[in-house]
Image: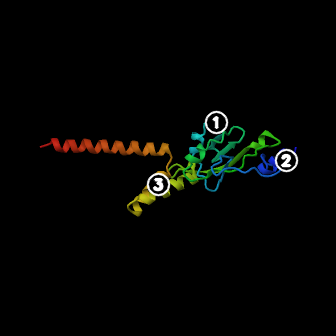
């Protein structure tokens, strides 16, 4: 018996005191994804990357809003959302204790407003996303006029862009036809 007690004291504790003391986790531990709505541009990259479909986005053009949501009950803590986020709005935390009293408590939501089209005024994309893309493009612009043109292009909905392209292409066809006629006349 004395030999056993001596071995126990030499070895020390073999277990952790969890749940009475915090569980130590390693540096690269993948816990609960934390979403910071102030950094999010609602681009839906995390929604596309999530293999468990734990992250979802719903766009309501009538209300002019996009709702981002995550269901921690479906999350497999793979970290794909963190990898795909262009602004770093999602980070995996050290938190892994997700016990709740109600299933509804496992869902978190954030609501974003949609920007209106510069031409028709209809809401089409999150305002934060439009601003983010416009800032990125203006950094690569050669002049202030080009930056303004790029900002206008980003602020236009796809339907209005198509209509503008059709009008531009039709104008090009007429100009090309007129040039061909001028070249063929003696």
Q: Give the quadrant of residue 170.
A: top left
Looking at the image, which residue is at 81% across and 41% down? Answer: 102
- Label pair 2/1, CB-CB below 8 angstroms: no
Q: For mark 1, what is the residue?
A: 52
Q: Of circles 2 and 3, which is in front?
A: 2
State the SS at label 2. helix
Classed neighbour count for the residue bearing mark 1: other residues with Cα under 10 Å, few (<14), some (14–19), many (≥20) = few
- Label pair 3/1, CB-CB below 8 angstroms: no
Q: For mark 2, what is the residue?
A: 5
Distance of label 2 from label 1 (alpha carbons): 49 Å
User: If you read the primary sequence from the N terminus, does the residue marked by circle 3 or circle 1 appear first?
Assistant: 1
Q: Of circles 2 and 1, which is in front?
A: 2
Measuring from the top left, give residue 34's x and y in whole percent: 67, 50
User: If you read the primary sequence from the N terminus, does the residue marked by circle 2 or circle 1 appear first?
Assistant: 2
Measuring from the top left, give residue 130's x and y in whole percent: 53, 52
Classed neighbour count for the residue bearing mark 3: other residues with Cα under 10 Å, few (<14), some (14–19), many (≥20) = some
Distance of label 3 from label 1 (alpha carbons): 37 Å
Looking at the image, which residue is at 82% across and 49% down? Answer: 6
- Camera-side residue: 104 or 61? 104
Q: For mark 3, what is the residue?
A: 152
- Camera-side residue: 124 or 58? 58
- Camera-side residue: 172 or 29? 29
Among all residues in the image, which is located at the extreme bottom?
Answer: 144
Residue 77 appears anywhere in the view: yes
Position of the C terminus, as image quadrant, is: top left
- Camera-side residue: 152 or 26? 26
């Amino acid at each position: 018996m004395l030999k056993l007690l001596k071995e126990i004291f030499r070895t020390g504790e073999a277990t952790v005191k969890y749940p009475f003391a915090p569980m130590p986790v390693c540096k690269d531990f993948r816990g609960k994804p934390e979403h910071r709505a102030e950094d999010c541009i609602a681009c839906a990259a995390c929604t596309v990357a999530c293999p468990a479909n734990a992250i979802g986005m719903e766009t309501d053009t009538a209300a002019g809003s996009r709702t981002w949501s995550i269901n921690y009950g479906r999350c497999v803590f793979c970290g794909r959302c963190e990898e795909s986020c262009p602004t770093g709005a999602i980070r995996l935390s050290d938190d892994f204790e997700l016990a709740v009293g109600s299933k509804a408590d496992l869902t978190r939501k954030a609501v974003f407003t949609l920007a209106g089209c510069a031409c028709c005024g209809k809401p089409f994309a999150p305002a934060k996303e439009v601003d983010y893309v416009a800032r990125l493009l203006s950094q690569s612009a050669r002049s202030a006029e080009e930056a303004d043109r790029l900002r206008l292009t980003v602020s236009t909905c796809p339907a209005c862009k198509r209509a503008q392209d059709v009008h531009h292409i039709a104008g090009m066809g007429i100009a090309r036809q007129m040039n061909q006629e001028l070249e063929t006349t003696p």
